[in-house]
Image: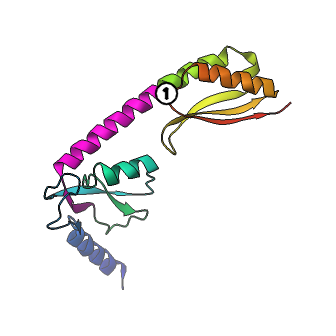
Amino acid sequence: MNRRANVVLTTIILAACWGCAVDARKTGAVCPVHNVALQDDRIKIAYGLVRTSGDEADARNKLFPHAATRYLGGCEVYTTSPSSALVSFRSECRKAEAAWKKQCQAKLDRIYEHDGQIHDVLGKAAKFKDVESYVSQSNGPAIGLRGKVKAEEDLAELRRMIEATKPPAQIQWHVRVEP
């Protein structure tokens, strides 16, 4: 096939798929949490690698199973990949999802604020110059500490100092002793 024919064929395929949507509706389904029939909507498809925390997966299953605010299209995107999906949703699930996300963001904000406090504590003691704090979101938000100290006593002191700040989340310790 010549180049001109390929261009024409590609144009026809793209035109045919423009506005195509994946049909993921659950006709006649009822939300098990809110016991109400689902409504239909068209949403944008998200492509790429999306990692969901265990907390989010649990919340999606238990609190808002039919929010249907996203449709994951996979990692590979082609010119013929659909851009939208038809889904079934429940407005109460979407409200519950929005409230859950707002609560998670408030917790994350507190963690970032507290990470700043820990950074200040670390900066006041020269023996902790090789220790840094960070915020981790891989398994639910947490504050992490990584680096090295010279003695077990220094590590014990560091633990006491950090615990005294009353962290709002779990501390992930990655501090090693290197004499």
**Residue 104, above or below 50:** above
Tell me which corner region of the image, top left, top right, bottom left or bottom right, holds residue 103. top left
Name the residue nearer the viewer: 3 or 80.
80
Query: How is the model colour-coded?
Result: rainbow
The x, y position of residue 130, in whole percent, is 73, 27
Residue 53 in sight here: no
Quadrant holding the C terminus: top right
The x, y position of residue 3, in whole percent, is 36, 78
139 in magenta: no
Residue 157 as seen in the image, left or right of residue 28: right
Name the residue nearer the viewer: 93 or 112.
93
Tell me which corner region of the image, top left, top right, bottom left or bottom right, holds residue 152. top right
Instruction: Give the residue drawn at x 51%, y 32%.
Output: 169
Instruction: Give the residue drawn at x 23%, y 47%.
Output: 94
Range drawn in magenta: 83-112
Instruction: Give the residue drawn at x 60%, y 17%.
Output: 120
**Residue 21, above or below 55:** below
Q: Which residue is mark 1?
A: 168
The amino acid sitting under disc 1 is Pro
Name the residue nearer the viewer: 130 or 81.
130
Q: Residue furthest top?
A: 124
The x, y position of residue 49, in whole percent, is 45, 57
Residue 117 as seen in the image, left or right of residue 129: left
**Residue 44, above or below 174:** below
The x, y position of residue 91, in whole percent, is 17, 48
Main secondary-structure element of the magenta-colored stretch? helix
Residue 118 as seen in the image, left or right of residue 62: right
Quadrant holding the N terminus: bottom left
111 in magenta: yes
Residue 168 in sight here: yes
Element assignment for label 1: loop
Name the residue nearer the viewer: 126 or 35.
35
